[in-house]
Every structure is written in structure tokens, then in C-alpha cells.
Image: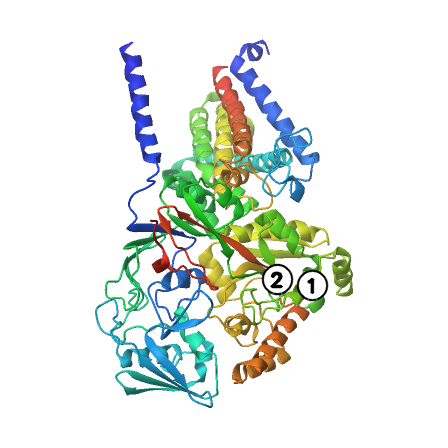
Amino acid sequence: MKKKFALILLVLLTLTIVLGACSSTGKGDSSKITIGIAQDLEDSLDPHRAVAAGTKEVLFNVYEGLMKPAPDGSVIPAVAEKFEVSQDGKEYTFTLREGVKFHNGDPVKASDVKYSIEKIAGMMGDKPRISAFSLIEAVNIEDEKTIVIKLSEPNMELPYHLAMTNAAIIPESNKTPDTVAIGTGPYKFVSRSPQENIVMESFDDYWGDKPFIKDVIFKIEANADTLVMDLMGGSLDMFKHMTKTQVDQLDDNFRIYEGTANLVQALYLNNKEKPFDDIRVRQAMCYATDKEGVIKLAFDGKGVPIGSAVIPAFKKYYMPELNDVYTYDVEKAKELLKEAGYENGFNMTITVPSNYDPHVKTAEVLVEQYKKVGINAKLELVEWNSWLSDVYGDRKHQSTIVGTDPSSMTARAMLERYVSDSGKNFVNFSDERYDEIFKKAISTVDDEESTICYKQLETILTEKAASVYIQDMAEFVALNKKFDGYTFYPMYIIDVSKIKPAS
Amino acid sequence: MESIKKNKKLMAGIVITSIVFILAFTGKIYTPYDPNEMDSTAKMASSSLEHLLGCDNFGRDIFSRVISGLGNTMMIALGTVGMGVALGTIAGAVTGYYGGLLDEILMRFNDALLAFPSILLALLFISLIGAGKYNVILSLGIVFTPSYARIVRSEFLRVRNLDYVSSARLMGASDARVMFVHILPNAYRVMLSTIAIGFNNAVIAEAGMSFLGIGVQPPDASLGRMLSEAQTYLFVKPSYAFSIGLIIVLLILGFTFISEGLEEI
């Protein structure tokens, strides 16, 4: 009897402990926010060397350039207060803002600006981190508050490029920007535990509007399956890239924001790898892809199908008609495959980063769709790290599904990766006419002419079927009701400084 | 035969296991729907006469996926056990029969393998040779080898100096013949129950590895893979995860009964 009683007591005790740990934190502390992110900042904390969209999304809060992006897609002055362009579009004069400080307490000097821009432009023996910066001939310090940037060719997009996280101003005194992040942004970097979290704290001496929330933790949440439970359990306050299915499972403790991810999600085909070196095969792949089907099956019908490499948010350049070039047509796909000599289909491998659940789901649907034209596709799930080094870096892949983001709010940022000699051209697309028009597009001072050029480039990508463009994914942001004020940008960034405690 | 019939555990085990085997076998030759075919009109459909267990997030028939996934899981488990038994028997026989330095070296190596947690070691192999169905069999097979090697070796140590073995040797039987024809049959009863347990461990290991995304690659089904997919919908459609969990439990239970029943004989 005594034994039985003791046993019951033990069970109750265990339950209390276990269930106690499950209780949600609910209301209360809103001076601290925990934001889930899909991957660690593995590439670099140095803003000039960061390549992954997910890294820049986080670093955006730490760093600023001379300019910074605004939620409406324009750029506003940041470290600089204002700028002037010369008549010929070859000389930019920036006036630095009074009282901007780095996170280590040092004021921003003209020499830091010169150092940063020269570093990005590759004037220190490196190759340019932002290709548009190769136009920069000289960065001159006029006086302590004035910087003049001289270009070899006229360029009207420079302020947009300067607003990228990749163009951030960092102190010259920081010799190890790879691991120690010092910027001028609203949040300062505190620590990083690999594969665990990145901790930030609001910067008291920030020149602009002070952020509302003091402590920010970016928690690495590589497993999409536990995401919903972690949000409901209270260990996460926010997650940015959620699907409709996940959002539907959340309770009413969350505010849901609906927007677009501003990514070009595509089945990127390696144009140098057989059989995708044949344009007919690539076109056949486009015809064999039922984008609506993908969106319906894997995304609950939310998402905007696209036909080229520009996202709909760039209204000026976006061409909706390109979406109708390859309408889903199994017969036509088979015909093209037959012409190309693949009457009986072929085997292919789709490499997908396993931590991006939407891409994995897309891949699963595509495998089924391609069966209908006789293509036998196999999935290969890889870790994000090996995706970066093997697929993106070494271009060792046959095809891959990811979303590419515009690193600045220009059409150039989306279209440059298809230039033959671009370092970002991981699909190995190569077309002489494309290269030529691209050169013309970036060198002209006439806005109308450059827009026409960019539109031609988009059309070429579609005609040559550089890849199978699928969609700009719908994106849902879940934010605990303790907070409010999440703001979308037409870029892949999380602006924590706009989030405030709910009133 | 009478003793087997009276052995309730063994009987229960055999019945449960036969049911599971029949399901898996059916899944190999016939499924009500193509397990990978998607249907946008049947997304997350609940149980009905058309779809016995309902449909998953892609509108794939869960019942079809369960029985075809069961087949994949069992294939991996059988492959793993087969490989482990083959390697383990050879290693155990050689070391137990000859003894000496070879015995020392192989058995210390064996101890080293046993010292690792098995899943961890399998993960290590996978990271070296890459994910996929056959690589999982290979790595789990290697990981499970030591346990069989030990049992076979101890049986050989016990039997190798018995009179009938010496006689066989005097009559000129080759070493291989003595090892595998005369001594090995003695080990079969101990082996049987170890195999049953080993099979269970293999099923769980496969489920674990596929759950982590390194076993069977999507879109193909396996029990572990499906369990990890079902996890997302735990709140919306608990029956999804539950049906897969149930099959895993049945599979394990059947073999556990068999192995316990065998020990009672």
C-alpha cells in the first residue's frame, strides 16, 4: 500500500515538473524578443563578405551604409545626411551625418567611410564585393564631413547599392570583422553561439529613432517541424518565413502578417551540365512544370507565379506577361524532349537545402510532375553549409531549388547573376547578347533606356529558359501578441527596430 | 509443435508479425493509390471509404504510404540484420575457432565499435558516405555486427574442444567445414532471439535516421520519414502520426514476443 502511494506520488511529481515546463510564457516581458531563423550565420559576420540572404537579413540590424532602404522600396540617407550628383552622373558628393557613432563608441570618421568603400570596391587588392562598385575610381576625403566618390562611368543606381548590407560602413580599427561585428545600426552585436543563437542589444547612442526592444535573440531553428510547437510553447516570439499550413496551426496568441518573401524561387538548372546544356531540354522542363500545381499543393494556394528572374515587388521592371510564355503543357514538353533526343526521358538530381522546408516540399511536388513527361528526378537533401560550398561555390550540381534575393533594390541585383562571368552565376548561364545588353543597361544615365534594357534581359532569360522560374513565395510572419509593428520591406530583411511592445 | 502452440508469447508474436509482413508484402505489389501521387483536391482529407486513413498535406493516400513505407523500413531492417549476421558470424567463427592474436585484435576492435552509441556511429558513417537507403543499410549493418560476433564467438569457444569436433577434425574435415557445418548449428537458438531483437533495433534505428532526414529520401515513404512529416500536423491531424506510430509499435511488439517466446522454449 505504502509502495503504491509512493509510486503515485512519484508519477504526480514527474508530471508537475514536465507539465510545468510546458506552460507558455504568455504575457509579460516585452523588453526581450526571441526571433527564430532557419540557419546560422555561417558565412561571415563581416557585412562585406556575407553572401547568404539569411545572414544579411540578420546583419541588417547591426550595420548601415551611407544610405539605407526604406519600407516603400526607396532609399533614405543613413550614415550620410545628404548627397549630390554631378551633371554627368560620374561624381557623388556625400555629406556625413553629425554624431553617428560605432558600437564601440568611436565616432564615424571620413577615413572609416573611405576605408569601407575601398574595401568593398576591391581597391585593396581584393575583388569587388559588389560588382557595381568596380566603377568606383576614387574615394576622396574633401574634409572631415565630406566624401566624394568618383566613377569611371555614369551610374544612377549608386545610392541603391550603397544601401545594401554588403555596403555597410565599418570602423577601420576593427581588424577582425569576420567574428567581431561593429557597425552603426540600431542594434549592437553581443555574442554568437554557433548553431544556437545570435544575441543583440539596442544601441543607446544610435543616431536615429531609438529601437523599442532592448534585447534581441536570434535563435537558430533549423527544424521546421518543431517550429509551431516552439512558437506556441513560448520559446520563440517571432518567425518570419512561415507557410500557410504552419500559420493555421497557431493559436490566437499570435499576430499574423501576410506578405511576399521577395525571393525568386526557381528550379535552377546548371546550364553547363547535361542534359540542361540543351535549350530544348530546358524549355521542356518549363513546359513540364505546373507552377499553379506547386503553389496549390505545397503552399495552400498562396504565392505569385513568375516567369523570369524579377520579383513582382519591383513594379517598374516586372513583366507579368512572361509568366504566360511557358504554360503547363505535357505534350509540348514531350515533343521538345523528343527533338532533343530524350524520347524516353532521363534521370536527374535536384539538390535541395534540407533546412528550407518550402523548397523541399516544392521539390517533392516537382518530382511527381516530371514523372508525367518521363523525367525521373531524384532528390538529394544537403545541409545548408554544403549547399553553399558545393552548389553555390563550386557549382557542382545538376539542378537545385532555392530562392534568390535581390541584394539591393535594383533590377541589376536580380539580373546580374546571369552575366557569363559573374561570380554569382551558379547556373552557368551564358549568352553573348545578354552580356551586351546588361553592359548597356548599367552604363546608361537615361532611366527610361535602362528600364527597356532590363526588360529585354528578363525576356532573354525566359526565352532561353535559363532556369525554371516558379514563384515569389507568399510569406507569413508570426509575431507574439506581446509585440506589434512588424514592417515588410521589398527585400529579404528583418527590421527589429520597427517592432514595439503592444500597447 | 505442441510446445510452440502452448507458448502464448511466441504465438502472439507470430500472429502480429505475420499481419505486419502481409501488409508490407501487399504494399510491395499493390497499393490502393500510388503512394507518391498527389491530389490537390484531397489535401488533408479525413478518413473515408476512399482513403482509409485519410490523406496527407500533398493529398497522398496515407494508407498507401504507410504500407509502402513499411516495406521500405522492413527492407532496410532486414538488410541491416542480414549484413550484421553475415559479418558477425564470420568474425565470430574465425575468432572463436582459431583464437590467438587474430582473436585479440578483432575482439578489441569489436569492443571499440560497441563502445559507441549505435545511432551516433551510424550517423558518422552516413556523414562519410552520404545519405540514402543503401548507405543506411551499410552503416547500420556495420554498427550491428559486433553484437552477433560476440554471440557466435562465445558459442564457438564452448563447443570447439568437444569430442565430436575433435573427431570431425581427425576424420580430415577442413576448418571451414568444421566451423560452419559442425559448430555453427549449435549457435542457432541463441542467434534466433538475438536476430529478433536486432531486427527491432534496426527498425527503430531506421525510423530514427529517416526522422532526422538522412535515411530514405523524399518523396519515398518510410515509417520514420512519415513520422517526421506527420509531426508538423500533430495538432491538426493527430491520426496521421498516430497511425504510423501504431504500425511501428506493432512491428516491434511482434518481434519482441517472438524473441521472448523463443527464450522460453
SS at circle 1: helix
Please, which residue is most extreme toward the front here? A503
Q: Earlier in the sequence, mark 2 or mark 1?
A: 2
- Residue A189 seen: yes
Q: Specify whether B93 is left or right of A65.
A: right
Residue at left offset 52%, top offset 32%: B238
Q: Which residue is mark 1?
A: A324
Looking at the rendered structure, the kind of residue marked 1 is Asp
Please, which residue is most extreme toward the bottom here? A88
Q: Specify whether A274 is left or right of A52.
A: right
Looking at the rendered structure, the kind of residue marked 2 is Ile
* Quadrant in the picture for residue A97: bottom left
Rendered-image quadrant of the N terminus of chain B: top right
Label 2 environment density (alpha carbons within 10 Å; few <14, some 14–19, many ≥20): many
Indicate the position of residue B114 as horizontal and vertical percent values. Answer: 39, 37
Q: Which residue is mark 2?
A: A306
- Residue B168 seen: no
Q: Nearer the viewer, residue A464 or B17?
A: A464
Total number of numbered discs in the rendering: 2
SS at circle 2: loop
Question: Chain ID for label 1?
Answer: A
